[in-house]
Structures are given as structure tokens and as C-alpha cells.
């Protein structure tokens, strides 16, 4: 098993730092999957147990150098478990650095060694190294860490500005632990909370639906009909708090009364986040 990667492009380096900060906000521990053409950050709190799932993907061309050898020739992948915050903490020093190197090492225990080459006033450079402890995940457990299957949504809709959505949900969290997210094929999305004493709804209009979503629906379907899902408000807030930068594309897919699936694109990094319905 071998892995080493290097980033020297400043924009990619800062973007990678932002991605690791986002992952740390979304998952305490996560799986890093390394394959010949991409890196994935994975969280699989089994949906059956009411947990969220995450699938974040970076193409290998994100890195200026990328070399890996998997567990074997036929299973050319590596799965590692790590504490997300350790990675984001190690990358804090990487803002505006000259280069970043990541390597799989063994220092009495398996590590992901992150080396940051800092700019300095003189011609010599300063290198800061962090050893992040990891667990190598055995081959037999890989099957539980595959990309989640997305059921056909009842409604697919573009999200409003995430900052706006976050401030609305933060206020609602003070009133209730549960939230209903509902949307239709007419570009409308509502966030609702109901308690014995109060009912609060925030309406978003003219958000637009992706073309496929509108075409693939039945002719007789009422576009104003709402699909809805009842979720834990804290899980939605955790997802929104992780979004530091407004994404290039942000979609919300609702499978009626089953789950909500957020599909985000941050330039060339994709993030899928699944929140199951409350039973």
C-alpha cells in the first residue's frame, strides 16, 4: 500500500483546506477512500439507524502529483479511517503555503503525514509536518462504504442561498427539534415547524427545478403538489453549517417521507449528503 500526493497550485491548496474544514463540520470521523483516479471522504452512519450519510469526491487532477498502490492489483484502492478535525487542523497552516504533500507513512502506527511548505522571507523554506493517526480499513468492510444509491426523487429543486437558509433554520431550531422540508415542481420550497403552540413556515419561490426533474414526471402530475420529508432539524443545521462557500450548484432531492438528498458542486468537488426521514 502506497499513497503520496502533492498540491502546489495556490487556489487548489486553499480549496482543499476549505473542503477539509467542511468535512470536519459534517463528520467527526470519516473514511478516506483513495483510488487511482479520485479521493473520497465518506460518512456512512447507516440510514437504517437514523444516521446521515455523506459522499464527497475530488478528482485526482485536483493534485499536481498523485501516486497510489492499493491493497492488491485487483483491489487497487485504500480505505482509511481518520478523525476529520485532525486533518483540518493540520491544514490550518496551509493557507497561502508554497506546497502541500500528503503521504501514507508508518511511524510506530499508520499515519497520514501532511507536510506544508511555508513561504518565508529568505530563499529557504520552512516545512511543518503533521502525523495524523489513521486506521486501515480491512477489505471485508469495504462493501459498507460504497457510494449511496439515490432513489428517484419525487421532487428535485435548486436550493436558495445557503446562508439565508441557515439563518432561517437556526431561528427555527430554538422552537422545535423537527422540521418539515417540502417542495414542488413549480420552484417552491417551504421549511415548516409545528408545535402545539406555534406553526412557522418560510416560503422560497422561483427557485427553479432541474430540466430532467420536470420532464421525467408524469403528464398528469400536478406541478404544485408538494413532496415532503420530516427530519431532525439539527442534522439539517449541521449540513448548512458545514457550507462555508456558496456552491456552484446546489440541489435538493426529496423522496417523499423517506429522505432528503442534497447534491452540491463546489467547483470541481462534489458533495452528496443524505438525511433520513424521522420515523
Image (cartoon, grey):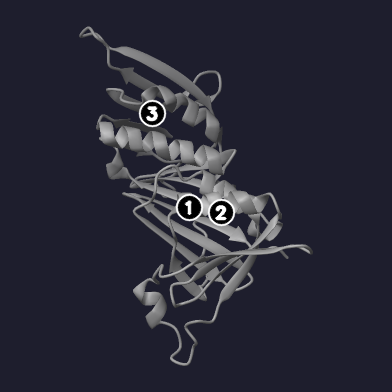
N-terminal label among 3 and 1: 3
Report the mark closest to the observer, 3 or 1: 1
Q: Residue furthest right?
A: 196
Up-down relation of residue 188 to residue 74 (above or below): below
Report the mark closest to the observer, 3 or 2: 2
Dots 1, 2 in contact, CB < 8 A:
yes
Residue 144 image label: none
Q: Which residue is mark 2?
A: 168
Task: Determine the CA span between mark 3 and mark 2.
Answer: 39 Å
Up-down relation of residue 90 to residue 25 (above or below): above
Foreground of the two, 4 or 274: 274
Crowding around mark 1 (Cα neighbors within 10 Å: few <14, some 14 to 19, many 20+) is few
Foreground of the two, 55 or 218: 218
| Residue 83 x %, y % | 57, 33
Q: Which residue is mark 1?
A: 164
Task: Determine the CA span between mark 3 and mark 1.
Answer: 36 Å
Q: Is residue 15 left or right of residue 86?
A: left
Amino acid at each position: 500500500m502506497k499513497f503520496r500526493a502533492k498540491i502546489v497550485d495556490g487556489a487548489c491548496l486553499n480549496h482543499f483546506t476549505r473542503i477539509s474544514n467542511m468535512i470536519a463540520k459534517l463528520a467527526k470521523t470519516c473514511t478516506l477512500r483513495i483510488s487511482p483516479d479520485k479521493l473520497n471522504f465518506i460518512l456512512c452512519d447507516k440510514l437504517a439507524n437514523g444516521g446521515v450519510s455523506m459522499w464527497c469526491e475530488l478528482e485526482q487532477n485536483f493534485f499536481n502529483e498523485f501516486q497510489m498502490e492499493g491493497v492488491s492489483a485487483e483491489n487497487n484502492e485504500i480505505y482509511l479511517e481518520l478523525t476529520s478535525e485532525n486533518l483540518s487542523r493540520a491544514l490550518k497552516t496551509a493557507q497561502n503555503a508554497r506546497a502541500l504533500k500528503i503521504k501514507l507513512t508508518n511511524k510506530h502506527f499508520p499515519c497520514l503525514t501532511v507536510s506544508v511548505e511555508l513561504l518565508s522571507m529568505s530563499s529557504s523554506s520552512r516545512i511543518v509536518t503533521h502525523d495524523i493517526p489513521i486506521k486501515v480499513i480491512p477489505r471485508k468492510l469495504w462493501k459498507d462504504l460504497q457510494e449511496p444509491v439515490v432513489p428517484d426523487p419525487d421532487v428535485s429543486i435548486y436550493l436558495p442561498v445557503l446562508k439565508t437558509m441557515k439563518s432561517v433554520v437556526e431561528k427555527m431550531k430554538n422552537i422545535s427539534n423537527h422540521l418539515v422540508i417540502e417542495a414542488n415542481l413549480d420552484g417552491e420550497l417551504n421549511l415548516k415547524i409545528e408545535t402545539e403552540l406555534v406553526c412557522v413556515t418560510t416560503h422560497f419561490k422561483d427557485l427553479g427545478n432541474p430540466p430532467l426533474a420536470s420532464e421525467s414526471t408524469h403528464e398528469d402530475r400536478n406541478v404544485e403538489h408538494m413532496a415532503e420529508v420530516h427530519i431532525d432539524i439539527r442534522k439539517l443545521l449541521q449540513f448548512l453549517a458545514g457550507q462555508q462557500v456558496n456552491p456552484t450548484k446546489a440541489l435538493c432531492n426529496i423522496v417523499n417521507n423517506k429522505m432528503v438528498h442534497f447534491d452540491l458542486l463546489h467547483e470541481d468537488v462534489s458533495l452528496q449528503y443524505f438525511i433520513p426521514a424521522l420515523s
